[in-house]
Image (cartoon, grey):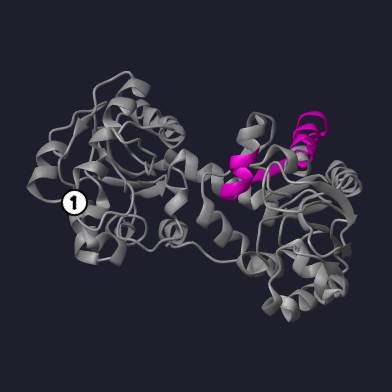
Amino acid sequence: MNFANLDLQGKRALVRVDFNVPLDDDQNVTDDTRIQRAIPTIEALFERGASVVLMSHLGRPKAPCAELSLVHVVPVLSELLCKPVKFAEACVGDVALNVTQSLNPGDIALLENLRFHEEETAGDEFFAGQLAENGDVYINDAFGTAHRAHASTAIIAKFFPEDKAFGLLMQSEVEALNQVLATPATPLLAIIGGAKVSSKLSILENLLSRVDKLIVGGGMAYTFVKAQGGRIGNSLVEDDMMDKAREILDKANAEGTEFLLPEDTLCADMFAPDAQTHVHPTHDIPNGWMGLDIGLVARERYVQAVMESRTILWNGPMGVFEMDVFAKGTKDVAAALATVTTKHDAFTLIGGGDSVAAINKIGLADKVSYVSTGGGAMLEVLEGKVLPGIAAIYA
């Protein structure tokens, strides 16, 4: 469903991008990754003879404000494209149309922040129709917002019944997820980390019947350990999730899915980089100690599981990787993913904010198969949900 089959010559391609980028106090873009990821789609549209109209949100404004205007993105976008970018000081109405209706093939314009209008997040159909007046074809290239049924991500597609498609970034995200969830090479391994079972419960339940092995790390592991009768000291735990944890363990057993918890844990006497540390068996952590990373035995076992797999999904770190002393588990998993990708031709998908941040910090993002741009969207796909922004293109 990309735009290869659309007639784009002389058309205005209205493209939903995700330019929700961080700004400093002077409204300078501090990380242009999301803008860079949109460039291939923009350039491909130019090559097909189109002009391009970009629309995006930035932040969560309660009303129009200069601090969150997309005008701050224009200099970065212009530099990346090596061409001037026109800016419309509104996203609908005459102000926007005066800009978008004057474009020639090869021209590009950026509309003002969609969320300056509450109708955007409300999924208002009239507002979506106003947005649609800015283009002749609709391209959704914003996977990071595909889980939102907003005016610009889902509702607008009905105004382009035959002239809608995914952008190259969105297409690559969909294909990467399909390679893990629909047509994986086996064995298929999922590595799920993070702090809480409650935030990953639906993911665990959905993946159990799909994967051959499931690794659990991070703070959420201790809820499972306690559910098995283990002693976890002062480690993070969700006591109200004990029954759910047991259900997941029972389901894994029934499905024949190997469920790996860390055998040993690097513990600390306080949550600080200069804490006293000691390695304890994960099922026997004394009071006064908290688990903040997986231990050496667990690291070696997890690395072995990665090396034996042909498809690997990684969502969530193994420990508090932000502190170097508790980052070894996350680093070893990341290094194994890079090795199995580059030397054994495995397919490795990294998704979810913390695991993406971790692999970028470790410097191995270019050594894995795919790093997803969508945090919340990625999580909802892993939960088995259909994303409104994707469904709207197929409708």
The C terminus: image quadrant = bottom left
Considering only vertical position in the picture, is 117 above or below 50? below
Residue range corresponding to the magenta coloring: 332-358
How many numbered callouts? 1
The residue drawn where x is 89% and y is 44% is 296
Few, some or many residues within 10 Å of mark 1 (<14, 14–19, 20+)? some
Residue 232: image location, x then y, percent: 81, 66
Kind of residue indicated by mark 1: Pro
Of 216 and 288, the residue lying toward us? 288
Residue 213: image location, x then y, percent: 83, 57
User: Is residue 333 visible to the viewer in this orientation of the structure?
Assistant: yes
- Which residue position holds label 1? 64
The residue drawn where x is 62% and y is 34% is 361
Of 251 and 16, the residue lying toward us? 251
Residue 26: image location, x then y, percent: 28, 32
Say whether residue 188 is left or right of residue 105.
right
User: Is residue 182 visible to the viewer in this orientation of the structure?
Assistant: no
Determine whether the residue tagged by mark 1 lies in a helix, strand or loop: loop
* Residue 249 magenta-highlighted: no
Q: Main secondary structure of the magenta part?
A: helix
